[in-house]
Image: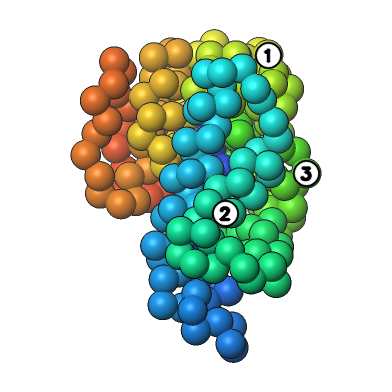
Amino acid sequence: MPITTCIFDAYGTLFDVGAAARAAAAEPGRDALAACWQELAEDWRQKQLQYTWLRAVIGEHCPFWQVTQDGLDWALERRGLDGDAELRGRLLALYRELDAYPEVPQVLAALKAAGKTCAILSNGNPEMLQDSVDAAGIGGSLDAVLSVEEVGVFKPARAVYDLVGRRFGCAPAEVLFVSSNGWDAAAAAGYGFVTAWANRAGAPVDRLPHRPAHVVPDLTPIPELAP
């Protein structure tokens, strides 16, 4: 079955989740952050994800913006920076306008030129997603920005992947789902999507019941996977 619809995860896939800490660390007077920004960014991302999984398991959903703040607070405390309220505010402000990866605009434009439906499917709540889409200037290449807030549970719950068919009326086999999160690509494969894992870090494939159909180093090959 031909691919008609290309669905992208947002954070880490289209948007560089390390960009906020990197940008803040480069600002004058940020010596303490500059010494540990990479570790802080990794801690922040890991806790953000862990809190989504735990909240899904215990049935206590909240907007992604809340787990983003909670993850940052944990990361700041671990690095001894939790007393700097101004830094916290700056990092959160930067997270609302994350850089898109360099190849993203061209990839989305190529897919649209080929007649594909393109959309985001993300844990992010609508407001923060819209901020990032606007900052990256990619809204014109997207047919929709789908958020888990429509179903009140984070990925990888099947109800989240249901949003794609509900919105576009396509069969799972018509969908190329792209994520930089191995667990997300695996779960989407189990759902029935054709999946591509953007393995930017060169990590091993997750040992889960399902595996992505494609593993790519970034998004550049994606148009070739949806002819």
Crowdedness near tag 3: few (<14), some (14–19) or many (≥20) residues, C-alpha within 10 Å:
few
The residue under label 3 is which amino acid type?
Glu
Position of residue 38 in the picture relative to residue 175 (left or right): left
Front position among marks 1 and 2 = 2
Question: Regarding mark 1 in the picture, which secondary structure is present there?
Answer: helix
Q: Are marks 3 and 1 in contact (CB under 8 Å)?
A: no
Residue 16 visible within the image = no
The residue pinned by badge 3 equals 127
Name the mark on residue 166.
1
Q: Is residue 66 above or below residue 52?
A: below
Name the mark on residue 72.
2
In three-dimensional space, the C-alpha distance between marks 3 and 1, rounded to whole angstroms, equals 21 Å
Residue at screen point 61% across, 46% down: 70
Front position among marks 3 and 1 = 3
Camera-nearest residue between 8 and 83: 83
Location of residue 132 in the rendering, given as x and y in whole percent from the top left corner: 68, 53
Camera-nearest residue between 92 and 104: 92
Front position among marks 2 and 3 = 2
Location of residue 61 in the rendering, given as x and y in whole percent from the top left corner: 66, 25
